[in-house]
Image: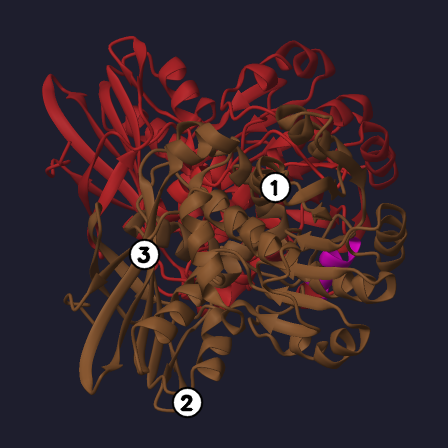
Chain colours: A red, B brown
């Protein structure tokens, strides 16, 4: 039904390549491209070199991207490169007439700022070009946004309180490692907390608000309110929300490591001069830390991510909890990548399917909750991320 | 009485330059040299540019050193550069006919190994050249070795147990910083422990043996058995020693930071490839951490370093504790450097005085305990590091 170009050959790119190749009824031509072609070739070899083409591309370079787009002529680009590269890829899509999907919002390299403003500013350009841009189609943002849209559509007349709860109860056996790009991970986790309350943002110190929450099949885990990008679009698209928060679990050791990394200056995103060369400490740290793509082999345990929602249905207060649990071992067995990559890559693939099938296709720039959630929810169950729902349980909030 | 060349313009070099300049009756010409001449000039400006010459020298380069030695013609080089540079400086001394003094043993860049073998191997060469090399003339090694020699000479017939106790109860107000070159500091502190017992070395895990010890004017501080280089020469020069250990105080936060620095790979001394360039993580970390030379300004509290000795005097068991306490604030006020630099730089200056006065001068390579301790002990009281002795107190060992 269509040609797809995947940009990025990390853990998420590995999963997307596997899942896209599994759905050859939807994707009839596939290309995987990244700065390092050998990484693409290694992934393609595992999947089958007849199923997937590879290419080298510098995603920071619009001309380089346009050249590749024009020669391969994809219907859709799945951007699972770095968030810094969202805008260059969107620019290239506009020039070459290609539709766009990503999993994380653009952020500038030199400030840790999570907001959609830069990408939402492309709304008119994509509309005028008759092209679709689907933003934030991983798990969170992505599935959590679809969960919210599904709840609002089917189970509530009005949603009032949303708590997105993200638990990783996995064990990778390393003293310290991040589950995705350490640079992005550390920037995200060490920022100040922020949540939506009564029409405005409330800022907190990093990790100021926390309590143990119970996760299905896992039990109680200390969970921390952090800011997460889907909150920005969800409070805009669901204006009845009185409160919206994002909770993530962290172990004490993980937090100690983060605290020290900040104390010693290795979380800095401004360059220092080392032997006459500018080097950004957090980027150097990334080169020293374990590669998240290599964590899969001995990763045990599971993730549990979901939405806990309170609102009104037929004049009565109702609570609702919809979630998915994902096993790191099963994810690795299927794709060679761990659960955190898997839960991001599968939804990106489903989003691409929605586009290819014409179900999520309209000119402009959209967050995923702006599309019909039903076919996406159906596909989650088929593609390896089955979900479960609980009604009127104690949300612990 | 003589010309002295100081190599190294860090915190210790700053103190040596100040103290040497204060003793113009002994040192009639002074030069301070380092890789970065501007650092020397800044120090010279504070002391008085008429009192001290400056020069640029690459201490890794024997030819460069020889050229400087031949033009300035010092009687003695005080080496307070990096321990990696001990051998190039000793080689240059032999070529140019200059006497030598340092404060820390040579170690190769690519292995954290503290031993005198490399420098002791120069014994015949210095002897043949009629030159004196004085090794390890800081506080520890240095004063601790002189303390031991003084105790053995005056207060014991036989010394049996030696515990060197090094407490830094200062507070520099930073979340994490090292008191001297972080590269050397972290390599030293994260190595395995080792002590002398009944004629052989006993190895321990890092920080395996620890207990609170009481320090004069400070109180109880958790103290850890680590290996320290003066133990090697002391057990050789005092063969009656049945046990010799080195204890250092560390705060829990300091140890947590060290543990994390190791866990994340930033203590590695082997290079990684970053953007095509070889970079040693611990050297990069050094560039990110606070400069130990800049810690002085707000440093409060004091250090307490001494020797606790048990042995036989006139057929009876005797205990002896000799120590110095040094105030970070007083050190900064006098020299612009904190106490850890001060307690290293003052003994180096006194060692140089001993040489210039002909009291510590004989052809060959020697550790400081092989010289007469008495004039050195007398000078400690005059130069800012007064010492105190206690007899037959509980050594807590």
Instruction: Estimate the x, y position of residue B384 in percent, counting from the top left.
Output: 43, 42
Chain identifier of the residue bearing label 2 in the image: B
> For numbered disc 1, what is the local secondary structure?
helix
Question: Depth-wise, is mark 3 or mark 2 nearer the camera?
Answer: 3
Tell me, yes or no, if residue B39 can be seen here.
yes
User: Label 2 belongs to which residue?
Assistant: B200
Q: Residue at x 24, y 57 (%)?
A: B222
Question: Depth-wise, is mark 1 or mark 2 nearer the camera?
Answer: 1
Q: Give the label on residue B40, or none.
A: none
The reply to whether the magenta stretch includes residue A41 is: yes
User: Relative to A175, does residue B310 appear above or below in the rendering?
Assistant: below
Q: Quadrant of residue A145?
A: top left
Q: Residue at x 36, y 75 (%)?
A: B152
User: Label 3 belongs to which residue?
Assistant: B323
Q: Give the label on residue B20, or none.
A: 1
Instruction: Estimate the x, y position of residue B311 in percent, counting from the top left.
Output: 26, 80
Q: Is residue A230 left or right of residue B130?
A: left
Tell me, yes or no, if residue B166 can be seen here.
no
Does label 1 or label 2 sit earlier along the sequence?
1
Foreground of the two, B389 or A362: B389
Label 1 – label 2 distance at C-alpha? 40 Å
Query: Which region is colored magenta?
Result: A37-45
Chain identifier of the residue bearing label 3 in the image: B
- Asked if the residue under mark 3 is in contact with the one under mark 1, i.e. CB atoms within 8 Å, the reply is no
Label 1 – label 3 distance at C-alpha? 23 Å
> For numbered disc 3, what is the local secondary structure?
strand
């Amino acid at each position: 039904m269509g040609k797809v170009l995947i940009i990025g050959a990390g853990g998420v790119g590995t999963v997307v390549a596997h899942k896209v190749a599994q759905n050859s009824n939807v994707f009839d031509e596939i290309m995987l491209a990244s700065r390092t072609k050998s990484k693409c070739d290694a992934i393609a070899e595992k999947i089958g070199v007849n199923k997937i083409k590879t290419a080298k591309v510098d995603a920071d370079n619009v001309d380089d991207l346009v050249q590749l787009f024009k020669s391969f002529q994809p219907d859709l680009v799945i951007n699972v490169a770095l968030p810094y590269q969202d805008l260059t890829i969107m620019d290239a899509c506009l020039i070459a007439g290609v539709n766009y999907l990503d999993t994380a919002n653009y952020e500038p390299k030199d400030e840790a700022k999570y907001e959609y403003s830069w990408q939402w500013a492309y709304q008119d350009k994509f509309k005028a070009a008759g092209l679709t841009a689907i933003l934030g189609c991983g798990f969170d943002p992505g599935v959590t946004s679809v969960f919210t849209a599904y709840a609002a559509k089917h189970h509530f007349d009005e949603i009032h309180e949303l708590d997105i709860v993200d638990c990783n109860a996995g064990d990778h056996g390393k003293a310290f490692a991040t589950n995705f790009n350490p640079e992005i991970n550390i920037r995200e986790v060490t920022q100040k907390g922020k949540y939506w309350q009564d029409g405005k943002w409330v800022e907190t110190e990093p990790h100021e608000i926390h309590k143990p929450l119970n996760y299905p099949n896992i039990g109680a885990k200390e969970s921390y309110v952090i800011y997460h990008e889907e909150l920005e679009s969800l409070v805009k698209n669901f204006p009845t929300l009185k409160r919206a928060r994002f909770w993530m679990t962290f172990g004490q050791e993980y937090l100690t490591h983060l605290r020290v990394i900040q104390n010693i200056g290795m979380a800095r995103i401004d360059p220092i001069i080392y032997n006459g060369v500018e080097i950004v400490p957090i980027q150097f740290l990334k080169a020293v830390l374990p590669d998240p793509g290599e964590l899969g082999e001995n990763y045990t345990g599971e993730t549990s991510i979901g939405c806990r929602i309170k609102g009104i249905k037929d004049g009565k207060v109702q609570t609702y909890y919809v979630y998915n649990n994902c096993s790191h071992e099963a994810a690795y067995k299927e794709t060679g990548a761990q659960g955190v990559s898997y839960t991001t890559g599968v939804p990106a693939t489903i989003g691409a399917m929605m586009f290819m099938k014409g179900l999520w296709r309209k000119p402009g720039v959209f967050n995923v909750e702006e599309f019909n959630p039903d076919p996406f929810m159906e596909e989650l169950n088929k593609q390896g991320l089955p979900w479960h729902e609980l009604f009127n349980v104690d949300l612990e909030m």
